[in-house]
């Protein structure tokens, strides 16, 4: 499969200090169009800080971030919302609005971008069908399982068809069975052409996919493993360690998740 | 902001309030009770002010004429008095009228006047002054000048009472202003914090909206609308409670004034602005990148 090598996210000599402490030190990395990259490191390694710099929730102390046409050193504050509409963001704690239904949570991303009411309805319906939650569109987040909530968060993140999806420990709160389903969903989104940069502390979870892994430790990139697999990652999930774990759990029938049992 | 976004923002404002009825009602009651203290204070001030105004309205100065002054001199004095800028009305009071009025005032003791034989009272002019000229300095100067006019015996204006009254009124305004400022600051503080709590409970919603690319205006407007709504409704609640208190007070003190319609409108607008401003202030730190 031929890959478009356009750089979607570029991080150049990025450092971030909090007082005298270096949180990130001279980070250099690029994510190309349609790529799936794991960002692996222990807690406190700087993964979340790096992602925050990419979606420009914080400014680098030095160096720069480039996301499509947006350059951190030249950005005006008023253009940040435009950047956020071009990237999707997913968190470990889902960050859904508790007083809004599933449909409304997903619609929010389209509404802030100014989509017409018809488009909002059509696109939310389409996305919810893709993530398998259309039948729960009128439910509130507290009525959903963790896995379902993360699916809603992912649906919201991709509602504006972003060129890159940033996922910060998206499976951190989920058991292996649900984790597998969330990874499947992320691979599916990636197969549709969206680049994915997923931060995780769980090396076991990701190394069996043979995908590019950037190792972060103490705020530095210590290893950036070359991409050795090009194609639809969904093919690889069955052989992955996470699948082994999930299968074991399913066999023992101890998974507590309501919505993602298959 | 395009038309669609504007429509969503309006929808968002109403949805936000509709879904948080209990929290909104709670905030409105707290703010309303707090504002009630302010409006009760304003009403008290207005009523005291009206009593002071009425007292000045009734205040008169007297120009006593010398005994047997010529009619032409008397008329000249009247014309001179009318020519003064602070004078609103000049009425001649003959010595007979003055005696009759004195008799009436004395009531049962009027017989003692009969012992006098002749009328000891002089002819006089009763001078009504414009309220803004009822000041010791002005009247003192006037008394000095007019006292020297030909045919004028004396110019009296109750200098002792006026001096005391002025001190009392000045003291009242100083104390009233101090209390007013303290109450106003306390009210602003309570309203700002109540609205701030509303914003804090929605902190997650603000963060989420920012993450999905909402502009600051898109996020802010529903909160400003909610702040203004809370301010306006709580002020109406305070006015309604004030009306109840006023109705009750009127049973004991008929003639107690109530706020004028335009004052009420101004107060509601002020509270709405205060609510919106408090909301704006509370959101500032969440909207910084």
Image (cartoon, coloured by chain):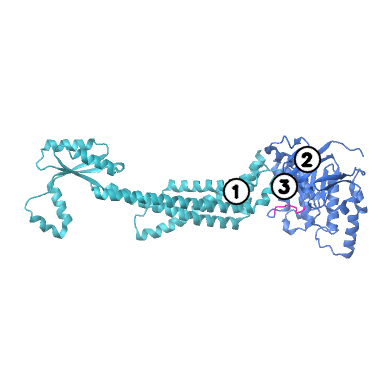
Chain colours: A blue, B cyan
Label 3 sits on a secondary structure element that is: helix
Instruction: Name the side, left or right, on which B271 lies relative to B252.
Output: right
Please tell me whether mark 3 or mark 2 is closer to you in this view. 2
Instruction: Please state the horizontal and vertical placement of residue B52, each as a whole percent of the image.
Output: 32, 50
Callout 2 environment at 10 Å: few (<14), some (14 to 19), or many (20+)?
many
Q: Earlier in the sequence, mark 3 or mark 2?
A: 2
Label 2 sits on a secondary structure element that is: strand
Letter of the chain that mark 3 sits on in the rendering:
A
Q: Residue at x 84, y 59 (%)?
A: A261
Would you say the residues marked 1 and 2 are in contact, meaning their CB atoms lie under 8 Å apart?
A: no
Residues A84 and B172: in front is B172
Furthest toward the left, the residue is B117
Badge 1 and badge 3 in a common chain? no
Please tell me whether mark 1 or mark 3 is closer to you in this view. 1
Query: Between marks 3 and 2, how big is the CA–CA gap?
Result: 34 Å
Label 1 sits on a secondary structure element that is: helix
The residue indicated by pointer 2 is A14
Q: Which mark is residue A107?
A: 3
* Residue stretch in magenta: A92-97
Furthest toward the front, the residue is A20
Residue B19 colored in magenta in the image? no
The residue indicated by pointer 1 is B282
Q: Which image quadrant for residue B254?
A: bottom left
């Amino acid at each position: 499969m031929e890959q478009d090598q356009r750089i979607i996210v570029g991080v150049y000599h990025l450092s971030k200090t909090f007082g005298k402490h270096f949180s990130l030190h001279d980070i250099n990395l690029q994510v190309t169009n349609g790529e799936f990259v794991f960002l692996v490191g222990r807690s406190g390694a700087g993964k979340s800080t790096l992602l925050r710099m990419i979606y420009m929730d914080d400014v680098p102390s030095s160096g720069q971030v480039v996301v499509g046409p947006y350059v951190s050193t030249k950005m005006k504050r008023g253009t940040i919302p435009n950047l956020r509409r071009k990237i999707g963001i997913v968190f470990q704690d889902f960050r859904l609005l508790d007083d809004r239904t599933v449909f409304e949570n997903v619609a929010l991303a389209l509404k802030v971008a100014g989509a017409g009411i018809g488009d909002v309805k059509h696109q939310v319906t389409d996305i919810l069908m893709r993530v398998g939650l259309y039948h729960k569109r009128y439910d509130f987040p507290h009525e959903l399982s963790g896995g379902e909530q993360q699916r809603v968060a992912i649906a919201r993140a991709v509602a504006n068809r972003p060129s890159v999806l940033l996922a910060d420990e998206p499976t951190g709160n989920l058991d292996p069975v649900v984790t597998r389903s969330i990874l499947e969903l992320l691979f599916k989104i990636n197969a549709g052409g969206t680049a994915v940069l997923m931060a995780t502390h769980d090396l076991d979870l990701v190394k069996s996919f043979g995908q590019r892994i950037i190792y972060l430790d103490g705020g530095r990139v210590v290893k950036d493993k070359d991409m050795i697999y090009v194609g639809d990652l969904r093919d690889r999930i069955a052989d992955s360690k996470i699948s082994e774990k999930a299968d074991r759990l399913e066999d023992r029938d101890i998974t507590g998740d309501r919505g993602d049992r298959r | 902001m395009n038309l669609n976004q504007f429509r969503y923002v309006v929808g968002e404002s109403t949805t936000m309030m509709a879904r948080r009825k209990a929290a909104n009602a709670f905030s409105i009651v707290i703010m309303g009770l707090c504002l009630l203290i302010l409006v009760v204070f304003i009403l008290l001030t207005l009523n005291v002010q009206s009593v002071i105004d009425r007292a000045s309205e009734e205040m008169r100065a007297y120009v006593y004429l010398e005994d047997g002054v010529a009619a032409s001199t008397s008329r000249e004095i009247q014309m001179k008095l009318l020519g003064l800028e602070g004078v609103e009305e000049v009425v001649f009071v003959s010595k007979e009228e003055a005696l009759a009025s004195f008799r009436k005032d004395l009531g049962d003791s009027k017989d003692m006047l009969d012992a006098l034989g002749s009328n000891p009272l002089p002819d006089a002019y009763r001078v009504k002054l414009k309220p803004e000229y009822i000041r010791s300095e002005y009247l003192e100067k006037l008394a000095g000048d007019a006292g020297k006019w030909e045919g004028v015996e004396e110019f009296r204006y109750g200098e002792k009472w006026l001096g005391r009254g002025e001190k009392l009124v000045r003291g009242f305004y100083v104390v009233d202003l101090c209390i007013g400022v303290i109450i106003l600051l306390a009210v602003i503080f309570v309203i700002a914090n109540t609205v701030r709590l509303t914003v804090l409970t929605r902190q997650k919603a603000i963060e989420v909206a920012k993450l999905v690319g909402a502009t600051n205006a898109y996020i802010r407007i529903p909160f400003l609308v909610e702040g203004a709504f809370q301010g306006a409704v709580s002020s109406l609640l305070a006015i309604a409670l004030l009306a109840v208190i006023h109705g009750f007070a009127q049973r004991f003190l008929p003639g107690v004034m109530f706020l004028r319609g335009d004052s009420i409108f101004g107060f509601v607008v002020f509270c709405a602005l205060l609510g919106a401003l408090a909301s704006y202030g509370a959101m500032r730190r969440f909207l910084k990148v």
